Image (cartoon, rainbow, N blue to C red):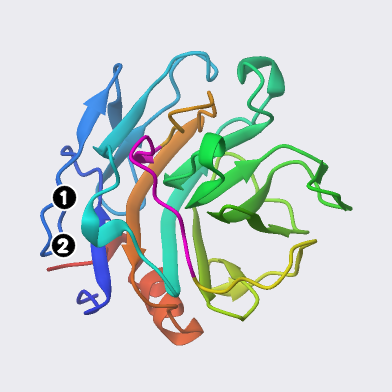
Amino acid sequence: MAQLSSLQGLWSGNDSPNDSSANGYNGTLENGVAYGLGEAGDAFDLTGNNGTTDEYVLIGQPVPTNLQIQNAITLSAWIYPTQIPNPNYSNGGGALGLIIGSQHDGNTAGATIFFDGNTNSQGITGIPPGHIQFQIGNGSWHEYDTTTQLPLNQWTLITATRTATNPAQIYYNGVLQPSVTSESAWNGTISYPSGAMFAIGQQNDYNRPFVGLINEAQIYNAALTQAQITAIYNAGRGGICP
C-alpha cells in the first residue's frame, strides 16, 4: 500500500528502528530490543523477560515537532501480544502496556494506545482484561476503552482515530469496535511537555511495558477513514511502502 500524505511516522521494525516516512524520525533500540517475524517483514520483539525488562524503541524526547499532533490524529500498529499487562510488573503504573504514543502522567499529557489489562479505569467498568485503551491528555484525560478482548499470540491491526469534539474510534483489523468512556468532550488540544517521549513499547514516567511484538507502528495527522484503515489491513504482509 502506498503511504498516505497524512503519515507523519512509520516504524516497520524490519531489522531497523528507522522511520520509513518522509520525516526521518529514526528511532533507537533501548535495553535489548530484538527482532522477530512480523506481519509485514520483521517486527520489534519486546517479549523480554515477561515484561520485567525495560525494552522499547525511543523515537524522541521531547516529542518531535511533527509528532506533536493536534485536532485530528490516528495511531496504528500490528501487534502480537503474548501477555496481558500485569500490575505486578508495572511498579505502580497499572496494568497497561504502551503500544505507541507519548503519554506522560505527570503532566496529564500525550496521545497513546495501550494494551490494557484493567477491568475498570477512570470510573469506566465493564471492560475485559486484554482490551485496547486510547488515551489523550491536555490537562484532563480523554479516554476510550474497547469492550472487546484482544486475542493473545496472533497478529491484530490496532487503529485508533479521533477528531476534535467527536468520539474516538478504535478498530481491530479494520472493524470498528464498541467502546466506552466517562470523559467530557475533547476540544482538540493535546499537551506535549518537554519531559514526555514518543516511543514504541514503553512509557517514560511509568513502567508500562508492552510484552509481545509490534510491527508497522504509524502516526497520522488526520483521522483515517474506515476504508483507509481497511486498505492497511488488507495490505497485510505487503506493508506500507514509500
194 relative to 154 in the view: left or right: left
165 relative to 122 in the view: left or right: left
Tag on residue 136?
Answer: none
| Kind of residue sitting beneath label 2 | Ser
The image shows residue 172 at horizontal and vertical percentages of 58, 64
The image shows residue 140 at horizontal and vertical percentages of 64, 54
Q: Is residue 81 visible?
A: no
Residue lying furthest right in this view? 126
Determine contact: label 1, label 2, CB under 8 Å. Answer: yes
* Quadrant of the rendered image containing residue 169: bottom right
What residue is at 49 percent from the left and 44 percent from the top?
103
Where disc 1 sits, the SS reads loop
What residue is at 38 percent from the left and 39 percent from the top?
196
Where disc 2 sits, the SS reads loop
The image shows residue 115 at horizontal and vertical percentages of 60, 43
What residue would you read off at disc 1? 25
Main secondary structure type of the part rendered in magenta: loop
Residue 203 in the magenta stretch? The answer is no
Q: Quadrant of the N terminus?
A: bottom left
What residue is at 61 percent from the left and 71 percent from the top?
186
Q: Quadrant of the C terminus?
A: bottom left
Assess disc 1: are there few (<14), some (14-19) or many (≥20) residues with their C-alpha within 10 Å of its C-alpha: many
Q: Which residues are magenta?
A: 189-200
Q: Is residue 15 visible?
A: yes
What residue would you read off at disc 2? 21
| Separation of residues labelled 1 and 2 (CA atoms) | 8 Å
